[in-house]
Amino acid sequence: MNITFDHLVHFTKSPEEAKTAFQLIGFHAIDGGKHPSWGTYNCLNYFTGLRYIEWIGFTDFDKAKTSDNVLIQQIVTDFHKEEGFSQLAFRTNDMDAVINHVQAKGRKPIGPFTGSRKREDGKVLSWSMLFIEEEQDDTCRYPFFIQWGEPEEARMKEMEPLMQHSIGSPSLSYIGMHVSDLDKSLQKYCHLFDMPRQSVTQNKDEFGPYSELFIGNISVRLYETAPIGHALINRPFLCGITKMPENKTIQVKNGIYQFTV
């Protein structure tokens, strides 16, 4: 299965405020656009390799509640709990191969769903998204997969200015998740991505001990423990951004962003 990390979805009631917080740090964060059929809109921040953060919010909550798109269903659920990171997306150039892989793993693919939005310059961006039916076993969510309507080379050329920031060329490097059942969550991810358990490494930082997997050229860290009262269980809570001017940890819309040199 040929995949690479694409983006991190951060649900917030005000994507504009998250965008402004990043702009004040020196990032080239931008307005994205509206998804009329889903009742949502977004702001974006791109990194090297076409990775990005998507801050997503609602324009029409009633419409969002009726959407059959799994991501929109998830952020509606998150709205009733707490702002913060919702999902991981991995990019593919062969969605049919991903569907076949998911089925071969004994899981049920959901979709693909088509999506589009019109940019301020009038250009329409299109994509398709594939999800995996969740197991009701109290583990972290499956990520979803996305295939863009344009070749990666064309997107890279067009998006290059958006990956340039006044603070340099930072890289979105790792994602951390608190999970309620570490062993089951590891089994889930290792099984889906054909990773032997021996490839999982153990480490520890200020957020606690974690198990680390390298999937689609990004590090995914699974933490078994969470601070008391923390609602982001089985959802990402941490985004690591490297090649920054200084080491610093900030909180934006209930998401922890850890900057390292």
Image: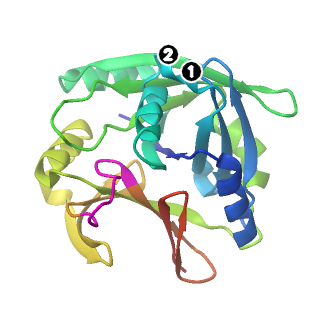
Helix, strand or loop under label 1? helix
- Identify whether 190 is placed above or below 120: below
Nearest to the eye among marks 2 and 1: give it: 1
What residue is drawn where x is 72% and y is 55%? 29
Would you say 129 lies left or right of 158 here? left
Q: Which residues are magenta?
A: 226-236
Q: Quadrant of the N terminus?
A: top left
Three-letter amino acid code at the position of disc 1: Asp
Q: Give the colouring mode of the picture.
A: rainbow
What residue is drawn where x is 35% and y is 48%? 235
Residue ID for mark 1: 62
- Identify whether 137 is placed above or below 128: below
Q: Quadrant of the C terminus?
A: bottom right
Say the numbered circle drawn on residue 66: 2
19 vs 81, nearest the viewer: 81
The quarter of the picture where residue 212 lies is: bottom left
- Outermost residue, bottom direction? 246
Helix, strand or loop under label 2? loop
Would you say 45 lies left or right of 197 here? right
